[in-house]
Amino acid sequence: MSDLLERLRGRGWRITSQRRVVVEVLDGDHVHLTAEEVHSRAALRLPEISRATVYNTLGELVSLGEVMEVCTDGRAKRYDPNARQPHQHLICSECGTIRDVHPAGDPLGDLPATERFGFTVSGVEVTYRGLCPSCARPLG
Amino acid sequence: MSDLLERLRGRGWRITSQRRVVVEVLDGDHVHLTAEEVHSRAALRLPEISRATVYNTLGELVSLGEVMEVCTDGRAKRYDPNARQPHQHLICSECGTIRDVHPAGDPLGDLPATERFGFTVSGVEVTYRGLCPSCARPLG
DNA sequence: TTCTTGACTTGGACTGTGTCCATCGTAGGA
DNA sequence: TCCTACGATGGACACAGTCCAAGTCAAGAA
């Protein structure tokens, strides 16, 4: 069983087959799936799993800090299982591919007090945009 | 007439009453409205304006680089008329208020070549999150 | 000025994403 | 093994955004 499931049990989660499958789908590949993609992959193993359950489970994983929600465009959110290691995202504007990246610098520290307008700033998201090698190629 | 309308005319835009009203709504306050908010404000001046037209016009303004699309959460996109001056956003996680901010540092330069994976990186969005003064206040 | 035409607008249907809720099922403790 | 509160279900619903066929009109031509 994955460390993640163990941590969840430790936090009082009731481990059901549905939750197990959702967690395993996320744990399997470190790609950035939409909720629908998680649902269809989960349904391969557990055909009767409902959309509502997948949405609920993803929402809970996000609020526990185990999974990161990535809002790339106006479309579906994507879920990043690599939430425990700080990182940013590089997104292809053409095909939507997402890569995790680790920039130098400290964006939080870059925001001077005079630019905080009294806010309690708790986090920062950095999203780089561009074209991936395939999409940048002329008639690729 | 606004500079923006003049620029648009220069780019071959047909200036219709609908487009004029949408541009005026955006030009008026430098806040970050959703498409629906733009539509309802536009409808105060031009009651019969349709949602489709507002969406079309906003989309065109974005692709011309005159307006910036801001995707704050999974909900509706917001439209920022301040697209010609580079800036970033500070968002209250509680009430959704958005402020334009101008951090020090150069996030684009912070992404080393080894972290670009062959991408042609063209831009970067930085979103700071936290609580605004009203929402941070205990029982405010 | 009037005419012409193709770009623009309209409204309603449609899609995709996500939420809600009443009901049913079951994990895990007693 | 039994109980029960927590979780799952699925279908209705809400919201954001897109699409399309038909009607309208801005602006250049005559």
Image (tube, coloured by chain):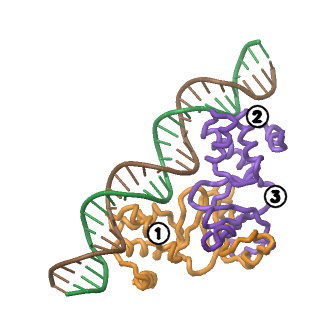
Chain colours: A purple, B orange, C brown, D green
Q: Quadrant of residue B68?
A: bottom right
Q: Quadrant of residue A99?
A: bottom right
Dot 1 falls on a residue whose secondary structure is: helix
- Pinpoint the chain carrying mark 2: A
Q: Nearer the viewer, residue A104 or A132?
A: A132
Asked if marks 1 and 3 fall on the same chain, the answer is no
Amino acid type, residue under disc 3 in the picture: Gln
The residue to which callout 2 is attached is A15
Residue at x 75% of width, y 71% of height: B116
Dot 1 corresponds to which residue? Answer: B58
Q: Residue at x 62, y 74 (%)?
A: A138
Spatial CA distance of label 1 from label 2 is 46 Å
SS of the residue under disc 3: loop
Q: Residues within 10 Å of mark 2 (few under 14, many from 20)?
A: few
Say if labels 1 and 2 share a chain: no
Residue on which the image places disc 3: A85
Q: Give percent across and percent down for residue B134.
A: 63, 62
